[in-house]
Image (tube, rainbow, N blue to C red):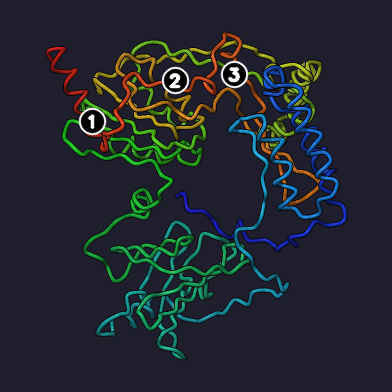
Amino acid sequence: MNRLILSLLFFIVRTIAFGQNCKCDSTFQIVKHHIETNYAGWFDKTKQFDKAKFLEITNEVTLNTKVISNDSLCHKEIKKYVNYFQDGHLHLNLNRPKFQVTNNNKPIVIEKIGISETEMLTYFKSLKQLDKVEGIWENNNYKIGIIKSKANPNIFNGIIISSKNENWMAGEVKLVAEKNKSNSYKLKFITGDKAETIENSIVFFKNILDAQDLILSRVFPVSNDLVSIDDYTLETDPTNPKLSFPKKDIALWTFPNLYPQNMDVVKLLLKKNKSKLETTKNWIIDLRGNEGGDVRVGNLLLPYLYTKPIVWSNEFSRLSEDNFNKWFSTYIKDYYETLSKEKQQQLDSVFAVTKTHFGQFGNWDNENKIADTITFEKKMKTPEKVVLLIDKNTFSSGELFTILARQSDKVIVMGEKTTGCIDYGNVMTYKTNCSSISLSLPSSRNNWLDQGISIDRDKVQPDIYIPKNIKNWVDYSYNKMKEQTKKNGR
């Protein structure tokens, strides 16, 4: 579900050195321009700066970039300027490929083997023992028969039986598995668009064949101990949220992040465990090390936590031409193109007003509400008590979810102070004149700053600090909940 598709990362490797049009001093001027005109924290930060020191850093980087011709050194030098703003959402990126492939422009030749599913089954049933990679496998897109090659007993061809992907036809060889002397396996498969070949090692678990970017479930021979691909990836993908029940009266949620792609994971966990969650009195939501993402992923739990209206302080965007164009192309363009001309004109009228406010802060739709209020129709009886665990590595949207959730009377926040990186958000990434260097910057500013509140400065503070000598925070927080229950006579 959350497997990284390596084929998206494979691309023609660019040279490490700059091209003729990639001058480091020009790159710095582009970065400087974007920070000055598009970064939501520009005005606040520059008011706080030691102006003489900031001017010194700016002049130093300006001079040094004039004599740099290597992208790594250029990135390092410009980063001095970027880091001076001390904003965890403001990043200068060095975009080196994680994988290198040789692009020889030769088309991938797809082998065809004329064998039907019935013939495969007849062959498999004739064998005393199948190799563990042999059999009929499937996932949501393909049904594949993996059968030993006649030419080499350590080579196994994965032949398409049926495919929902129109690029692939029955009889085509999509993958080849190779058995090594150590009885381990490598699997080489062709991507769905037939553009790339990817090679990974294979892990077998019950009825699952896991090649990282391709996961299959065995259909034949039938396994006695079955697990679905969804359940398998839920358990094995380290970026997924997890839900467990370590004791009969406790539900433990673990959120390593709030990545938007995990929205469906959380919905699935809520659906699968609905009856159990509704009878479990105590919850622990572990946000330690949470890398942020989209707070709406965490907000899926709010109906269970809700006791009274939740105030959500809004953010205003820095309205600039660059930020508008980036926002429109990323979030609005595809939707806009599906609209009738009349509805497009209505949106055009809204955006025309927005453009008159370039240089100011506000919302793209011109509805500049300071805050929103979250309400639900009913209060859930369970959980009765909830602990949110936070630490110094709880970051960004993990912090915002804590701020929202702790407004419930059920919730106690335990742990230590968070990172402090949420005053400025809605990150946009801008290219520079060099393909290897880009700038990510927050485009919006939270309205709580106007009330003298700064989470970046003060962090999110727990209600109860967990002593440094405590190793098991989950047990500690559970015991604290039990103590409070006894005090309340429940």
* Residue holding disc 1: 476
Name which residue lies at 71% across and 44% down: 438
Sequence-first tag of 2 and 1:
2
Q: Secondary structure at mark 3?
A: strand
Residue 161 lies, in percent from the top left, at 46, 70
Q: CA distance from mark 2 to mark 1?
A: 22 Å
Q: Secondary structure at mark 2?
A: helix
Q: Secondary structure at mark 1?
A: helix
Q: CA distance from mark 2 to mark 3?
A: 13 Å
Type of the residue with mark 3? Asn
Picture layout, residue 301 above or below residue 8: above
Sequence-first tag of 1 and 3:
3
Q: Nearer the viewer, mark 2 or mark 1?
A: 1
Q: Nearer the viewer, mark 1 or mark 3?
A: 1
- Of 149 and 185, nearer the camera is 185
Name which residue lies at 19% across and 27% down: 479
Type of the residue with mark 2? Ile
Q: CA distance from mark 1 to mark 3?
A: 34 Å
Q: Residue furthest right?
A: 20
